[in-house]
Structure formats: structure tokens, C-alpha cells
Amino acid sequence: MLVISRFRYDDALADSARTQLSGCLDQLGARPGFVRGSVGRALDDPALWVLHTEWENVGSYRRALSSYEIKVAVAPLLSAAIDEPSAYEVIVGEGATEPNDARPRSL
């Protein structure tokens, strides 16, 4: 599974963004189930940054988020991400799986 978290930083905070997101990636990268990740910035909008991570499965990602170290060091930064869906299942390409059934969790 992959996780895409987008952030907006003013131009004056570009160095801070790079440092914060790099630290976040390092912390997440130390968790079991982490596959790979990167930090990027939009070419057409340099105030828009992205933290991309890939995980063996959704359970690994959720366990990483529930660890004490991540709650302290990473969760405050992730809470500043743009409010939009961030977790995706891979359905085409390397690591692809059959899509989950799209159905409501309760009626």
C-alpha cells in the first residue's frame, strides 16, 4: 500500500519543510513493514510538498502510526497535512493486489 501526504509551506519555510519531512521519513522508515519512501516538491507550485511512503500492507502502516515514537515525533507533522485521503491500495504495477470491495462499513 502507499501513502501520499501533501503539505503547504510558505517559500520562507522551504528549509524547514525539507528538514521536517526528512525527519518524518527517517522515523517512518525505521518501522517494521516500511518498504520505501521519498519527499518531493511540486515543480509548478514549490509551496506544495509531498511525503510518499510505501508499506508491505495496511496493518504495517497502522501499527507504525500507533507506535509511541511515531505519535510523538511524526503525528504532529502529519496532522498538518492537507485534509484529503492519503492511503491507497496498489492495483496496477509492482506490489499490486486485487482491489478491496467498495462497500459501506455499516448501514
Image (cartoon, helix red, strand yellow):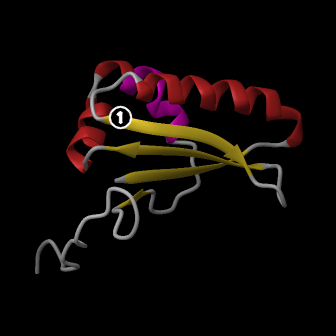
Element class at badge 1: strand
The residue lying toward the viewer, choosing from 55 and 48, is: 55
Q: Taken as a whole, is the magenta stretch helix, strand or loop?
A: helix
Provide residue 67's location: percent of width, then percent of height: 28, 25
Q: Is residue 73 magenta?
A: yes
For the residue pair 95 and 69, the one nearer the viewer reads as 95
Q: Position of residue 75 (x, y in %)?
A: 44, 33
**Depth check: 51 or 106 in front?**
51
Q: For the view shown, which residue lies furthest in the front direction? A: 94
Q: Residue furthest left?
A: 107
Q: Which residue is mark 1?
A: 34
Task: Provide the residue span drawn in magenta.
Answer: 70-78
| Dot 1 crowding, Cα within 10 Å, few <14, some 14–19, many 20+ | some
The front one of 12 and 62 is 62
The residue lying at 20 percent from left, 44 percent from top is: 59
User: Taking 52 as reference, is 44 left or right?
Assistant: right
Q: Amino acid at mark 1?
A: Phe
Q: Residue at x 37, y 26 (%)?
A: 71
Number of numbered discs: 1
Q: Quadrant of the C terminus?
A: bottom left
Give the residue at x 31% y 63%: 96
Q: Is residue 64 left or right of residue 12?
A: left
Q: Quadrant of residue 70 in the image? A: top left
Queried whether the magenta region covers residue 97, the answer comes back as no
Where is 75 relative to 90, above or below? above
Q: Position of residue 85 (x, y in %)?
A: 45, 62
Name the residue located 58 percent from the left edge and 39 percent from the top edge: 38
Rendered view: 51 above or below 15: below
Q: Is residue 83 left or right of residue 21?
A: left
Residue 78, percent from left and from top: 50, 40
